[in-house]
Amino acid sequence: MATITANPPRVGLPGLLKHRAVHKLLLLALAAAVLVPLANARWASGTWPSALTVDFSEPLAKASDWIIDNRDSHPLFLYFFGHVSNVVVIGVRAVYLTFLAVGWAGVTALGALVAWRVAGVKLALGTGAAFLACGLLGMWVPTMQTLALMVVAVLASVVVGVVLGLAAGLSDRMDRVLRPVLDTMQVLPAFAYLLPVVLIFGIGVPAAVLATVVYAAPPMARLTSLGLRGADKEVLEAVESLGSTARQRLLTARIPLARKELLLGLNQTIMMALSMAVIAAVIGAGGLGDRVYQALASVDVGAALAAGIPIVLLAVVLDRVTGAAGEKLGAEPEPHSGRGWLFALAGVVVVAVAGRLAGRLDWPDSWVVAIAEPVNRAVDWMTAHLYSGVPVVGGTADWAGHFTTWVLDPMRDGLQALPWWSVLLIVAALAWVIGTWRTALTAVLAMAAIGVLGVWKPSLDTLSQVLAAVAVTLVVGFAVGIAAARSDRLERALRPVLDVFQTMPQFVYLIPVVALFGVGRAPAVAAAIVYALPAVVRITTQGLRQVDPAALESSSSLGATSWQQLKQVQLPLARPALLLAVNQGLVLVLAVVVIGGLVGGGALGYDVVFGLAQGDLATGLVAGGAIVCLGLMLDRVTQPTERRAKKGA
Amino acid sequence: MRVRKTAVIAAASSLALLTGCGAADMTKQASPFANAQGAKTVTLSVQSWVGAQSNVAVAQYLLEHEMGYRVDTVQVDEVPAWDALSQGRVDALLEDWGHPEQEQRYVKDKKTIAPGGELGVTGHIGWFVPTYFAKKHPDVTNWKNLNKYADQFRTPESGNKGQLMDGSPSYVTNDKALVKNLKLDYQVVFAGSEAAQITQMKQFAKEKKPFLTYWYSPQWLFKKVPMTEVKLPAYKEGCDADPEKVACAYPHTPLQKYLNSDFAKNGGKAAAFLKKFKWTTEDQNEVSLMIADKKMTPEDAAKKWVDSHKSTWKKWLS
């Protein structure tokens, strides 16, 4: 789900850069020298001054009450939201009933044959096996529920995404408006999206689908626009010279030329929809996510895993199939593809009818393999032997305790003790040195908004957890990434591991980390590290591998050792990729640290959980807003100049 | 892909034809997974604690195996469950710990939810210490002496104060106010979910460490980790009216069932059954222990209970 858009390495002269950075910092210092005494004189306090906060809880609570009271009578709901909700329910239901009517054999055949047509025999076998595994784990019906929800959500996301993407791709003005919005939406944690839709639609499938659409549509829109803009100028001119209308040009040239980006967009949309469909269990999405959620309530890691594995399988299969479809598009089209589809369709019909005649539509109960118990035994053993009192190294609980006392506590207290204006100043300085004055301004405003919302302290608590987790993630991630970049074998071995870890639902991580590290901030941080690590490793490896081989050769011909090579050639040249890794690391860590509210992470995540659980949407929405601001700030602070500079791509 | 797409388009367009110009009341909408393939479906809401799972497991088992229904379950916390119940997205909530505000709104004003009678179980929330610790220090069971033990309850999360562990944010709690108003040298640490809290308590118990926790009965964990309640200032009617100024214990609450009004009226046998569903704390604990501790699936646990308590549940079906 990580959006990896590694930029071509662009080497700024270090001397010039330093020069510019010094300039910026001097300017900033000057501004600070004027503003800080003023601010300090007026609102002298360590934390955000209460005179500058606005209390949103009252109006939000009123809004929430009004919605509940008028949901069954107000025209806005009767004639607009009601229909939206209805369409979603009926759509999901239609797909779900279709799946049930086709039966497990039919659905498996459908999946396998579609995979065969678009991606080849190997993936077809994998797809079939994945579906059968879902059944074997006793998760057939939940899998179908999740799939039904996803089909509708992905279709809606694609429609919304393509429409927005067309608008942004064809009109420069729309592009200027939409691009920052879409960029931003992609870095926000899924958790922050849940509350507003619940406010309007209430708990249930419609809210879940809409949250998923809001979360999954942006990549489609971004890539559509990118594809349209990236089309070869010469081809377009040629088409234009043939005297075609704008509409013909769009349909016959620009869209077909952009199909690679469109498929990449579809791939990302599907992946994001899946991850959201799981998290949306918190707001009543049902399906696999709900099974994970229910299992966690009784500390049943085994049952959670039984529902988690189908999610991972679905994710890997969907990712590989859509990815392969994208790659195949570049190649020559096959001559008999129409006939192949006909075969595939016929195959599905035959299998479905056979299943129906055999009366075997539901997955047979006797074919279910119970994995929950052995898994739980393994987990029990782990906690019994590793938790504490292990000689020499100490137990995991001791580590967590030390980490909390020596790293998390000082960081949190330190951040909270900083005067509020100095936090803004640090944010401004970092963002400006790394990016432009625009990114710096956005970052500062986002940080200030947190203060205005009145959640300064919990936000800094969350921030301290994010920073601690990112620090660990980067140290480990860079080390593994560098190792993988230097050894093909390691990279190959890592690939499936990274795939699995990147697509596991965050929920599943939570309970083993609680078993190992107890309750509190340490397990939240641990889960975040595990979740963000794959993306960081991947981007680092890719960045290092993309470094111009010529540069490497010339340096080795000059007699550089491999360590010197790494330090003086590869790492500097891969700087943009490394910065991207930092950026992605921050975004992903934030997403999980927030979910850590479920295991005692406290701070903003807890407020969101509390808001959802108590129906106290005011608290939840304010915390959700703060999470949005925090995500925005962290993203902008680490946003390199290049990403802005490649306007129009 | 094409098959699904056509199905969706067909469904969407037929919907547009049917309701396109009319009003759509989204508060009267069932779950899309309900009533699939002509089966009669009941949607039950499950709350995150195991006791609630037991209620649902047994009700589900009987509905499916004795009455021929298909049962869908949805995990929702209590307060959102009220909302979902009012909208008809779930049909029943089997264990409610008392939400006067929601009762006023949905049962009395909007009349979208109908009371379903008592569950038969009485719930009680309190502060607990493990019995092995209470035996060694008998005076810890009175709140007045808690400050004396604060440093024994310290953890990295609570800093230099004692730790009072709270569970899921969805639970009814006054603990922050209580700590403040009773001037206790404690920090409330929210485990964030009941799962996390139980894991932590089991770990403490394994090492015989002292801990102080928000907990409630009926709860299966008492069978595994015996705990003794800490006496708080006695509960009097209305002493918890102002959430900021609470300084008294939690009440004993007879747990209630609630049904969606339409379902209560038109739900036929299923609704009648759910109204009659009533069992004891011991029954519930028996099932809960099988689910949470023996790690049986809720269905197996329900089957085991159903097989051995025929006389109890026969009454619900009549």
Image (spheres, coloured by chain):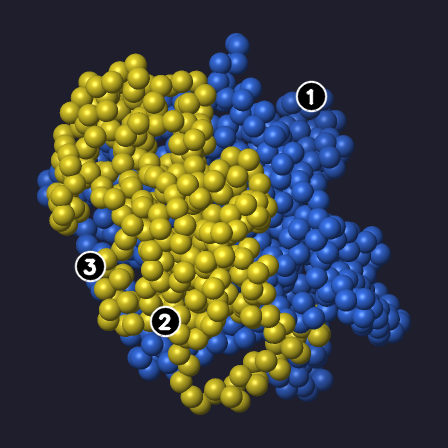
Chain colours: A blue, B yellow
> What amino acid does circle 3 point to?
Glu
Query: Is residue A442 something one can see in this rendering?
Result: no
Q: Which residue is outermost to the left?
A: A42
Task: Give the residue drawn at x 33%, y 74%.
Answer: A71
User: Image check: B79 left or right of A109?
Assistant: left
Residue A364 image position (x, y, % from top left): 73, 56
Chain letter for mark 1: A
Find numbered disc 3 in the image and state the secondary structure of the residue it sits on.
Answer: helix
Residue B206 image position (x, y, % from top left): 45, 21
Residue nearest the observer in this picture, A142 or A171: A142
Image marks 2 and 1: residues in contact by CB distance under 8 Å = no
Q: Nearer the viewer, mark 3 or mark 2?
A: 2
Residue nearest the observer in this picture, A155 or A357: A357
Residue A469 image position (x, y, % from top left): 46, 33
Chain letter for mark 2: B
Q: Nearer the viewer, mark 3 or mark 1?
A: 3
Label 3: few (<14), some or many (≥20) within 10 Å?
A: few
User: Image check: B236 left or right of A527?
Assistant: left
Q: Is residue B154 above or below residue A423?
A: above
The answer for how far apart the CA atoms under marks 2 and 1 are is: 78 Å
Disc 3 designates what residue? A58
Task: Give the residue drawn at x 52%, y 41%.
Answer: B291
Q: Is residue A434 above or below residue B206?
A: below
Q: Nearer the viewer, mark 2 or mark 1?
A: 2
The answer for how far apart the CA atoms under marks 3 and 2 are is: 31 Å
Image marks 3 and 2: residues in contact by CB distance under 8 Å = no
Find numbered disc 2 in the image and state the secondary structure of the residue it sits on.
Answer: helix
Find numbered disc 1 in the image and state the secondary structure of the residue it sits on.
Answer: loop
| Residues marked 2 and 1, same chain | no
> What amino acid does circle 2 point to?
Ser
Disc 1 designates what residue? A561
Disc 2 designates what residue? B261
